[in-house]
Amino acid sequence: MNTVNFVSIPASIAPDQEILVFGDRRLTYAQLNALVGRLSSAFKTLGLKHRDVIAALDTNSDSYIAAYYAAAKAGLTWLPLNYRAKDAELEYMINTAGAKVLLAGDRYLNLVARLAPKLKTAKVVAWGKGNAGMPRLEDLVKAAAVDETEAEVEDEDVSVLMYTSGTTSLPKGVMLRFRDFTAYVTANIEMADGGERGVALVCVPFYHIAGTSAMMTNLWTGRRMVVMPQFDPKSWLQLVQREKVTHAFVVPTMMKQLLDEPSFAQTDFSHLTNLAYGGAAMPIQTIRRAIQAFPKKVGFVNAYGQTETTSSLTVLGPDDHRIDGDPKTVELKLRRLNSIGRPLPDVEVAVRDDDGKLLGPSQVGEILIRTPRIMKGYAGREDDSKLPEGWRATGDLGWVDEDGYVFFAGRKDDMIIRGGENIAPAEVETVLMSHPAIDEAAVIGVPSVEWGQTIKAFVVKRPGHNVTAADLSEFCRTRLASFKRPEEIAFIEALPKNPLGKILRKELRDKGDTPQP
Amino acid sequence: MANQLGKRYLCEKCGTEVLCNKPGNGEIECCDGAMKIKEAKALPSSD
């Protein structure tokens, strides 16, 4: 079905329900639906037709959501651009996608002016006030009637072309179809019925799968969505209190910033029941700190997924985050806190070794998944992750325990092979980060004539703590097999990360030798 | 039983699933038989 139904069906059930909050603006389903209709007409006056690509460059807003649904209504492919991307990356994404229109927010006008001469097919349209002479979406919307039609989308039609963050290479355009989102949303989320479904605070960018899926699931289920233009910890805490937020999603870096924010202690969390996190691996210290700091009734949820799989695959629920019971249960729960949880009902998980043989419980290998919502493919390039019978190789390493909990052990490309032994970076990092003086750690393989690769660790000290490389080496000696111990330990100020908090190992590999303290 | 809003109905014979977005007194059928309600599992929301 066309994803515009995530708005239009609830709008027919509960037209007067307030569903969207952005700053001082508040929209009901009926108002949002009407705005979507007028925007869809405006897109058509720009000459856009079914299957054309429309690119969007701006921070989160209510009009961002309306524009996506208007694009869906007209059968267009939506290209949400990463506003932190460099000029060359944006040019690459817009041109390879063949976008016909680029919607440009006011804060990106200078960037777009630099970019415009290099764009092959895209016509720039101002998404705010714009510069003199630019066509403005606002003017087109004012003149437009509500579009009463809805594009008949077909099985292979792409709704969102989403370029992944690309921690290792050029961004890859993930083609997600209308049916991929429909499968995810209708299989996992109850439809709105006009009843109370809570309030969600959305602070992750809409160019990321977690942001895009949030704008579908919350609208479909009737959970009022409070949208932040961009995350900042102080405003996040204020909004939680002011809007009586019940549900929120953060990436690990944001969780840490929230815990470090001075106004945290004065914030009223009395409505917050569900705090989900994902997007990157969560350091165990941060989540343990969060469990202590938030009120007991806040249920934590760890979600693991990929853009290529239309959002979440596995979920570690609130019960698994409550560290209580007898000592044996506490030990088990602490171990499971490192887990990414169990598969959602429409997901199957398996683990295989390098020869393609399926592995049993607790054996580390590549995580394979099967779900009806795997992407159509990558735009303009081969997809070598497709396996027979609908399985996909995730490129992620991990294992599954006896009870079906999945554990993530890093990217397959990051696997270190030292003297023929496979070493998952996450295993070494977990040990390093369990040292009281260490805040964060990342390990990489460095070329070695003798071993093929040896292990180099980059660590960030906690403020006010002191530790030497020799101390850490000794600490690892008692906790890791000898071949897994880092041969080299470098202290750095901060780990290089992408905006979602994923460690940029490529930058670490490019770093030269760092002086020891 | 009459069709219910927001419920998914499954045909056990051919596998078709139907979602009800406006309820009525009727009862949906497929492959010459009544379709069964498919209960959604209660899940912690990750979004």
Image: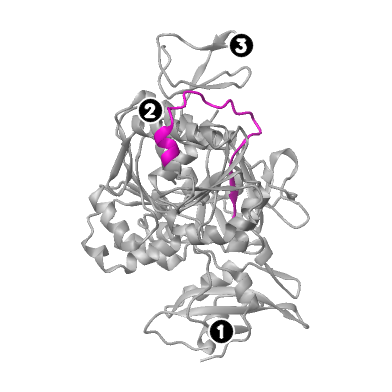
Q: Is residue B29 left or right of residue B43?
A: right
Q: Is residue A163 left or right of residue A19?
A: right
Secondary element under disc 1, as helix, strand or loop, is strand
**Residue A11's mark?**
2
Q: Name the residue at 42% across, 40% down.
A: A139
Q: Nearer the viewer, residue A61 or A511?
A: A61
User: Dot 2, how many residues are within 10 Å of its Cα: few (below 14), some (14-19), or many (20+)?
Assistant: many
Confirm whether circles 3 and 2 share one chain: no
Residue type at mark 2 is Ala
Question: Which residue, given by chain and number where applicable, does mark 3 sit on?
Answer: B31
Secondary element under disc 3, as helix, strand or loop, is loop
Q: Give residue A176's position: percent from left, percent from top.
A: 60, 41
Q: Is residue A50 left or right of residue A137?
A: right
Residue type at mark 3 is Cys
A143 magenta-colored = yes
Mark 1 to mark 3: distance in Å? 67 Å
Contact, mark 2 vs mark 1 (Cβ under 8 Å): no
Q: Give residue A136's position: percent from left, percent from top.
A: 45, 45
Q: How many marks?
A: 3
Question: Which residue, given by chain and number where applicable, does mark 1 sit on?
Answer: A490
Extent of the magenta region: A139-165
Question: Closer to us: mark 3 or mark 2?
Answer: 2
Q: Give residue A303's position: percent from left, percent from top.
A: 48, 51
Give the answer, above or below, for where A478 lies relative to A329.
below
Give the answer, above or below, for where A74 lies relative to B21.
below
